[in-house]
Image (cartoon, rainbow, N blue to C red):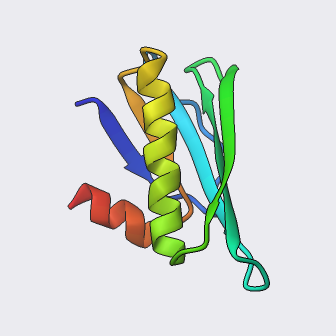
Amino acid sequence: DHLACSSKTKQRWQRPDSGWFKINVDGSVSKNNTKAAIGGAVQNSDGEWLMGFNMVTEMDEKFKIEAQTIVEGMKLAWLKGYKQVEINCDNAMLIDTIRN
């Protein structure tokens, strides 16, 4: 297994298991704008920040924006050689979709 997903809204950040990396992602949508912002951070099992990303993208459904955030975070992590990743996202429906 090379991917773990979770949706945690009320718990504090927890370190991934040894040898794993955690990607924390989020997207932000403004109803007054035609753009959305996405971003995330990658940390190792010691809790050290390794890298982050952010970008502005076209406005779309919140679900699609959150999904794009996960894809961008995974692309960045995998390009850096981090193959065992855990993703934290606040969209429980998206996490359920990925798991199923």
Looking at the picture, does residue 30 appear above or below residue 41? below
Q: Residue at x 53, y 65 (%)?
A: 65
Is residue 16 shown left or right of residue 36? left
Residue 12 visible in the current orientation = no
Quarter of the view holding residue 19: top left
Q: Residue at x 68, y 32 (%)?
A: 52
Measured as percent of width and height from the top left, residue 39 is found at 66, 47
Measured as percent of width and height from the top left, residue 78 is found at 41, 24
Measured as percent of width and height from the top left, residue 71 is found at 43, 46
Looking at the picture, does residue 81 appear above or below residue 62? above
Is residue 15 shown left or right of residue 7? right
Looking at the picture, does residue 86 appear above or below residue 17? below
| Residue furthest to the bottom | 31
Measured as percent of width and height from the top left, residue 48 is found at 69, 20
Residue 5 visible in the current orientation = yes
Quarter of the view holding residue 84: top left
Q: Residue at x 60, y 30 (%)?
A: 42
